[in-house]
Amino acid sequence: MNSLHQHLLDTYRSAQHGTPAPPLPGAHDWRALRAARDHRRFLKVLRGVPVRLSRGARTPGP
């Protein structure tokens, strides 16, 4: 069973139970990748390793 089949099955089940439909496959991939990257950054800070800020990262203002 691939992710599309699983999504269709979950959508059918949610319709039968009256619950909200699940998100489409891949809808939160970027969010998951960003969370993993931020977690690795957090672990580096705990170890005392210098962390580079990405180009789009914002620093807190005055």
Image: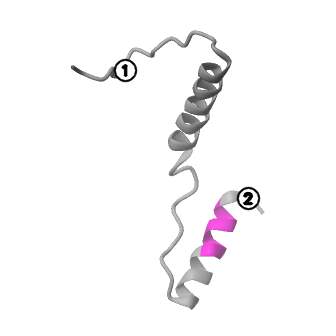
Q: Nearer the viewer, mark 2 or mark 1?
A: 1
Q: Tag 1 or tag 2, which sits nearer the N-term?
A: 2
* Residue at the spot 68% in from the left edge and 18% down from the top edge: 47
Q: Give how far across and how far down residue 2 sits, in percent.
A: 73, 58
The quadrant where residue 37 appears: top right
Q: Magenta span has 2? A: no
Which residue position holds label 1? 56
Which residue is nearer to you in this view: 49 or 18? 49
Which residue position holds label 2? 2
Left or right of residue 2, residue 61 in this image: left
Label drawn at residue 38: none
The quadrant where residue 43 appears: top right
Amino acid on which disc 1 is placed = Gly
Task: Relative to 34, say whether 13 is above or below.
Answer: below
Q: Secondary structure at mark 2?
A: loop
Q: How is the image coloured?
A: one colour
Location of the N terminus by quadrant is bottom right
Q: Give how far across and how far down residue 19 sits, in percent.
A: 51, 82
Q: Give the prevailing secondary structure in the magenta stretch.
A: helix
Q: Which residues are magenta?
A: 4-10
Task: Tell me how far mark 2 sits from mark 1, CA to CA.
Answer: 35 Å
Dot 2 surroundings within 10 Å: few (below 14), some, or many (20 or more)?
few
Q: Give how far across and how far down residue 5 sits, in percent.
A: 68, 66
Q: Give how far across and how far down residue 54 sits, in percent.
A: 45, 16
Dot 1 surroundings within 10 Å: few (below 14), some, or many (20 or more)?
few
Left or right of residue 14, residue 56 in this image: left
Which residue is nearer to you in this view: 58 or 30? 58
Q: Secondary structure at mark 1?
A: loop
Q: Magenta span has 5? A: yes
* Residue at the spot 21% in from the left edge and 19% down from the top edge: 62
